[in-house]
Image (tube, rainbow, N blue to C red):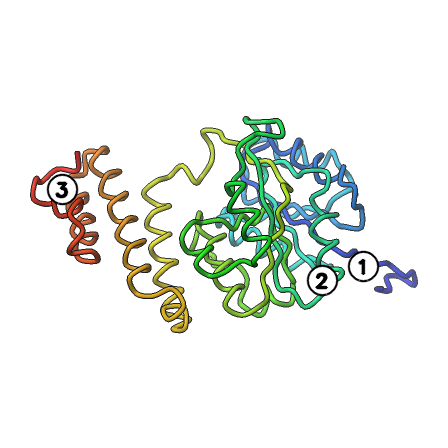
């Protein structure tokens, strides 16, 4: 409870934070999916990261149903951190401004942490908006989703594939602030980075439920292949540097294998873009990490990625 102007104001259980930039045409559907949650004990905070379209008009149309803030364009992580700073609840739900929350989103996630308050983060699955129906493709493959929910999520699960989506997570605000919030130097791989940092310090739980719908479109920032791969590599290196025990858990071979594959993907991407010197440099890194892997050696000897 908080006291404001002599009145007692109840603190919500969850603060939903949406960061947005020039997505006015999609933002309303996202906001509506939050406001229509079956669980209603939340506040909604939207941070406009310097939009130049009709975002402000859309936000003002909701009146006091949400709080909104505007800042100079500093990227999604900085905008989300600003939203978290203004959040009043003990639990944080971070949503993308182009995705859709399932009606059971907050009920499912908060229902778990309400009974397990020592949890640092709980996350679940998502589905693609353009692949509807009960048999639609899920972000995390169904078998893996079921397996993780039954036996628990491990660091190898997070490391082998980027499975943590902030849109599917509920975070302890206290835990989030204690690790410094989101890394503002990252524009794409902040989910992976935050997942690693939470896992290494706090209990993390996975639920085999679909709680959001991912919208695939040309404006997805994750479609920037070069930046995504470079950030992925940086986050992996950061994990091992900040948490030496991670190398013991994962093993050097697994770490080098994934890094090498990312360099190989980077080489292919650069080769397609006509950046042949950059492609060869990336392939050289892949070979350095896995010197006995014939596929990378062969491409290096041939002097081509195809």
Q: Residue 84 at x, y = what percent?
A: 63, 57
* Viewer-nearest of discs 2 and 3: 3
The quadrant in which residue 215 appears is: top right
Horizontal side of 237 relative to 118 (left or right) equals left
Disc 1 to disc 3: CB gap under 8 Å: no
Marks 2 and 3 sit apart, C-alpha to C-alpha, by: 52 Å
Residue topped by disc 2: 90
* Viewer-nearest of discs 1 and 3: 3
Residue 297 lies, with reference to residue 238, above or below; the image says above
Residue 83 lies, with reference to residue 58, above or below; the image says below
Residue topped by disc 1: 11
Q: Sequence order check: which comes first, mark 2 or mark 1?
A: 1
Marks 2 and 1 sit apart, C-alpha to C-alpha, by: 9 Å
Category of crowding for the residue at label 2, using alpha-carbon neighbours closer than 10 angstroms: few (below 14), some (14–19), many (at least 20): some
The quadrant in which residue 24 appears is: top right
Disc 2 to disc 1: CB gap under 8 Å: yes
């Amino acid at each position: 409870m908080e006291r404001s102007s002599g009145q007692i104001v109840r603190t919500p259980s969850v603060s939903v934070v949406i960061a947005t930039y020039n997505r006015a045409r999609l933002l309303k559907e996202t906001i509506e999916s939050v406001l229509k949650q079956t669980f209603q004990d939340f506040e909604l905070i939207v941070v406009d990261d310097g939009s130049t379209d009709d975002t402000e008009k859309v936000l003002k149309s909701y009146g006091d149903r949400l709080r909104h803030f505007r800042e100079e364009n500093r990227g999604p992580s900085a905008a989300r951190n600003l939203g978290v700073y203004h959040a009043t609840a003990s639990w944080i739900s971070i949503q993308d401004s182009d995705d859709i929350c399932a009606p059971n989103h907050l009920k499912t996630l908060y229902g778990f942490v309400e009974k397990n308050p020592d949890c640092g983060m709980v996350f679940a699955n998502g589905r693609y908006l353009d692949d509807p129906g009960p048999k639609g493709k899920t972000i995390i493959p169904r078998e893996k989703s079921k397996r993780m929910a039954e036996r628990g999520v491990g660091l190898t699960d997070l490391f082998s594939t980027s499975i943590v989506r902030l849109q599917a997570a509920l975070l302890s605000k206290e835990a989030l602030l204690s690790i410094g919030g989101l890394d503002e130097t990252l524009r794409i791989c902040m989910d992976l980075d935050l997942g690693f940092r939470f896992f290494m310090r706090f209990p993390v739980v996975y639920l085999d439920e679909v709680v959001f719908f991912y919208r695939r479109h040309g404006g997805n920032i994750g479609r920037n292949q070069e930046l995504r791969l470079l950030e992925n590599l940086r986050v992996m290196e950061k994990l091992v540097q900040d948490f030496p025990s991670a190398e013991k858990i994962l093993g050097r071979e697994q770490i080098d294998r994934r890094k090498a594959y990312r360099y190989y993907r980077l080489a292919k991407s650069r080769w397609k873009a006509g950046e042949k010197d950059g492609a060869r440099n990336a392939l050289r890194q892949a070979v350095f990490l896995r010197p006995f892997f014939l596929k990378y050696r062969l491409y290096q000897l041939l002097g081509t990625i195809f």
